[in-house]
Amino acid sequence: MWSMITHFLAFTAGTVAGVVLLCLMQAGKMADEGYENLERRNNG
């Protein structure tokens, strides 16, 4: 029984970590694009 609980918790933790990582990657991509646009406006 404990084995099922620990496997479920590990799966849940892995899923949550994956979603958080995807959100951070998306936020970083948006920040990079915003910074590029800002540089383009200032230099161009």
Image (spheres, grey):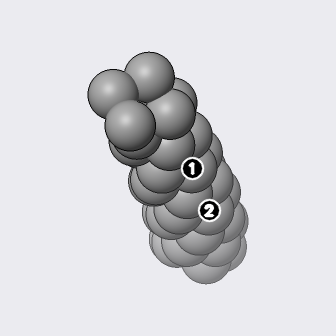
The circle on residue 19 is 2
Q: Kindly identify which residue carries mark 1.
A: 30
Whether residue 36 can be seen here: yes
Determine whether the residue tagged by mark 1 lies in a helix, strand or loop. Answer: helix
Q: Residue at x 62, y 62 (%)?
A: 19
Residue that lies at the very extreme toward the top in this rendered image: 42
| Residue 40 x, y percent position in the rendering | 40, 39
Q: Which quadrant: the C terminus?
A: top left
The circle on residue 18 is none
Q: Quadrant of residue 27?
A: top right
Q: Is residue 31 left or right of residue 1?
A: left
Choose between 34 and 30: the one closer to the eye. Answer: 34
Q: Residue at x 50, y 43 (%)?
A: 37
| Residue 6 x, y percent position in the rendering | 55, 61
Q: Separation of disc 2 and disc 1 at Cα?
A: 17 Å
Chain-order first, disc 2 or disc 1: 2
| Residue 3 x, y percent position in the rendering | 51, 71
Q: Residue at x 44, y 23 (%)?
A: 42
Tell me which amino acid carries mark 1. Answer: Met
Q: Kindly check if marks 2 and 1 are in contact, taking CB atoms under 8 A apart as contact.
A: no
Q: Residue at x 55, y 57 (%)?
A: 26
Q: Which quadrant: the N terminus?
A: bottom right
Residue that lies at the very extreme toward the left in this rendered image: 43
| Residue 21 x, y percent position in the rendering | 48, 53
Whether residue 10 can be seen here: no
Tell me which amino acid carries mark 2. Answer: Val
Determine whether the residue tagged by mark 2 lies in a helix, strand or loop. Answer: helix
Q: Is residue 5 above or below residue 24?
A: below
Nearer the camera: disc 2 or disc 1: 1
